[in-house]
Image: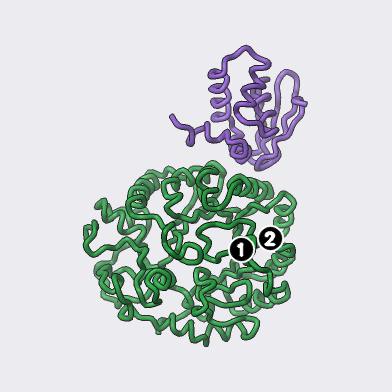
Chain colours: A green, B purple
Amino acid sequence: MRTYSPYPLLIDVCVTNRCNLHCSYCSAEAGPFASKKDEMSIEKLDSIFQELDLMGVPRVGVTGGEPFIRTDILDILKAFDKYSFAKILNTNGNLITDSIARELSKLHLDRICVTIDGSCSKIHDSQRGKGSFKKAIEGIKNLQRYNLPVSTLFTLGKHNVDDLINTIKLNDMLGIEYMSVMVICPTGRANDGSILTDKKHWYPVFFDLTKRIARGEFKVKFKIVPPNESDIFWTHYFPLAFYDRLDLLESVWHQKVDTDSIKKREISCQAGVRACSINHKGNVYGCDLMNGIDELVAGNVNETSFEEIWHSSPVFKKLRNITFDDLSGKCAECPMPWCGGGCRCSALELDQTLLGSELACFYNKEGDINL
Amino acid sequence: MKNHFTIKGKKDFVVDKVGDEYIGYDRIDLEYYSFDEIGAEILYCISKNFSLDKIIEVIQDEYDVNYADCKEAIINFLEETPILHIIYANLIKSDIYLYLKPFREE
C-alpha cells in the first residue's frame, strides 16, 4: 500500500452545489438548479473545520458550486477564519460586491481564487455564461480595493488554449500575483472528454509559453496543474520532447527527468493519499474531481468522523493499494519512467475503470514523440 | 463636475482641478500626478465607464479633431498614463483595454 499522509495536505470543502453560472465543463455539475437540500449547516461545517484543524491539515479550501450563492456564506467564512490552517476561497467572482469585499477584508483568508478563463468576454463567456467575464473582473477589482490576496484560476480546455498567453498578459495588467492553470479533467459535465485540448493546439502554445517564461516576459507567478501529480507533468514533457527541447523542462519548469532512477514506478494520483474533498452533503472523496461519483464516496461526515474515514475507508484503501502493475491499456504500455499513471478519475471516466488508462494523456505508442 | 471626480478603480483615484491643471493622487504608489485639460476629460469619461467611441464623441464636441487622430490620442494617453494599473479593470468593463497594448491588433 502506498504510504498516505496522517492527514490530508490539502482538502476542499464544498459548501454548496448551487451556482449562478452553469459552466460546460464543471466537474461538480453545479448550476442554478442544483438543490440546496442536504447542504451542511454552519454548525456542521464549523465542526468539520475544527476537526481538520485538530488533525493538523495545513490547507483547506472552501469551494462550491459558488460559495457566495449561500446567503450565510460570510458567517461560514467567519467560522472558517478561526482556525490555523491556510485558508483558500474559490469563487467565480461574479457575486463579490464592494460590501462583500469589505466584509472579507475583516477575515484572514490566505488566497481568494477567482476563475478567469480568457482574456476577453468572447472566450471566457463561451463556456461560463454571458456577462460572467466582466462581472468576474469587477469582483477582482472589488477584492483588490481592500488589498485582499486575490489570485486567478484558468481552466484550460480546447475553447481557450489559444488564449492562454493573452490571459497571462491580462493577469499582469491587472496586477495579479498568482495564476494557476488547471487542465480540465474529464469529469462531471466534461466527462466525455470533448472539451479537452489536443496536442495540435497545446504543443505550440506550451512551447511559445515556455520560451516567453525563459525570456522573463511575465510578472505573474503561475503554474500549470494537470490532474496527474507526477514529478514530471505529461502536459509539459511531451510538447518539449516533440520540439527536441527537453532541456527547458528543467531550466524553465524545474522538472528533472532522472534517467538513473531505478525506483519502482508508483501511482502518482494523490486522491486519498495526500488530497481529499468533502462535498456539500458531507460525502468524502479522494479529490474534488471525484465529486458525484457514487462508487468513490469514502464516507459521510454526518455519520462518521472525518478522521475515521481518512484512516479506515475501504475506498481510500482501494485507492492507496493501486499499483502500477494493476493498470491496463496504454498506461501499462507507456515506457516513461517518471509517469505515475495520470489521473485515476480520468481513467474511470474515459476508460470506464479506475485501473484503466489516462486517455487524456498525449502519450502515443506510435506517435510523434521522439523518445 | 470635471473639476472633482473619482475613478473607482483598484483604489479610488480622486482628481481635482487645481489652478490650470488637474491633480490626482495614486494611493497605491503614493504619488501625485497632474493632467492637462484633455487628459482630465478622458479620465472623467473613464470614471463614467464610457466606451472609446463615446469618449471620442465627447472630445470631438469640444475640439476640432478628426475621429482617427482623436482615437489615437486617447489610446496613446491611456497606454502611457502612470495610473493604468489603478484603472485597468475599468477599461475592461468598457472594452477599451482591447484597443491598448498588448491586446490591440497591430
Q: Is residue B68 above or below residue A6?
A: above
Query: At x 54% / y 18%, what residue is drawn?
Result: B69
Query: Is A284 placed above or below A74 here?
Result: below
Badge 1: few (under 14), some or many (20 or more) residues near its Cα, within 10 Å? many
Label 2: which residue?
Answer: A69
Q: Quadrant of the N terminus of chain A?
A: bottom left
Can see residue A219? no
Look at the image and tell me whether residue A44 can be seen. Answer: yes
Q: Provide the secondary structure element on which disc 1 rests.
A: loop
In this view of the protein, which residue sits in the foreground, A28 or B74? A28
Residue at 64 percent across and 24 percent down: it is B39
Q: Quadrant of residue A235?
A: bottom left
Taking the image as shown, residue B85 lies to the left or right of residue A185, namely: right
Name the chain under label 2: A
Kind of residue sitting beneath label 2: Ile
On the rendered structure, is B69 left or right of A252? right
The amino acid marked with disc number 1 is Gly
- Secondary element under disc 2, as helix, strand or loop, is helix
Query: Viewer-proximal residue, A331 or A151?
Result: A331
Among the 4 quarters of the image, the one containing residue A238 = bottom left
- For the point 26% across and 54% down, the residue is A242
What's the chain of the residue with tag 1? A
Q: Are marks 1 and 2 in contact (CB under 8 Å)?
A: yes
Q: Residue at x 76, y 25 (%)?
A: B3
Q: How many marks?
A: 2
Q: Which residue is mark 1?
A: A65
Asked whether the residues under marks 1 and 2 belong to the same chain, the reply is yes
For the C terminus of chain A, give its image quadrant: bottom left
Q: Distance from label 1 to label 2 (Cα)?
A: 8 Å
